[in-house]
Image (cartoon, rainbow, N blue to C red):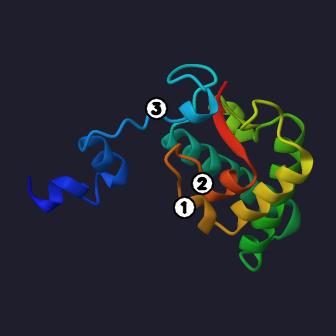
Amino acid sequence: MDKRQAIGSWLSGPRAGAESMGADLGHRGSSFGLPEHGPGSVAPPGRRLLAITLDWGLCMLIAYGFLTRGQAGLGNWTLAVFVVMAVLTVGTIGCTPGKRLLGLRVISVEGRRLSFPRTVLRTLLLALAVPALIWDRDGRGLHDRFSRAVQVRI
């Protein structure tokens, strides 16, 4: 076996490399007792990305329509609207409009609604963008990991 096969390629990632060497990592969310498929399972990355894109577009429309009439400052106002919307919606009903449309919800790793302080922490980290780009083996970004949250299918 050559070295490349042993560690996996950068395309397949470390999980595939570990599994090809015989490690049993289980399915995403197994460490939290979540099912592999169906309602309550960890939300797939593509759906989460589409949900945040929908939310960002909605926030951009709100910022453009109500807070600014030109391009100047649109990005900053969009981010501000996004933070307020995410804190209010995830903190109360557990999902943003984009997540709701795609059948996703944010819960704590204990399976309950995410508390308000954890929602604020999660949202502020998400606004930084970098924590959302670094994932753990369960597919959670650092913003979810630090706030002890997981996104699941409804």
Q: CA distance from mark 1 to mark 2?
A: 6 Å
Q: Pointer 2: what residue? A: 141
Look at the numbered discs 2 and 3 and tell me whether their residues touch, using CB distance below 8 Å.
no
Query: Residue at (24%, 44%) from the top-left corner?
Result: 21
Mark 3, Cα crowd under 10 Å, few <14 / some 14-19 / many 20+, is some
Q: Nearer the viewer, mark 2 or mark 3?
A: 3
Q: Position of residue 98 (x, y in %)?
A: 68, 40
Instruction: Say whether residue 71 is visible.
Output: yes
Q: Position of residue 150 (x, y in %)?
A: 67, 41
Question: Is 13 on the left-hand or right-hand side of 52?
Answer: left
Question: Front-most of 59 and 125?
Answer: 125
Q: Position of residue 16 (x, y in %)?
A: 31, 46
Query: Residue at (53%, 52%) from the top-left corner?
Result: 136
Residue 133 disc label: 1
Q: CA distance from mark 2 to mark 3?
A: 16 Å
Q: Pointer 3: what residue? A: 27
Look at the numbered discs 1 and 2 and tell me whether their residues touch, using CB distance below 8 Å.
yes
What residue occupies the far bottom of the structure in this picture?
72
Name the residue type under label 3: His
In the image, residue 32 above or below residue 48? above
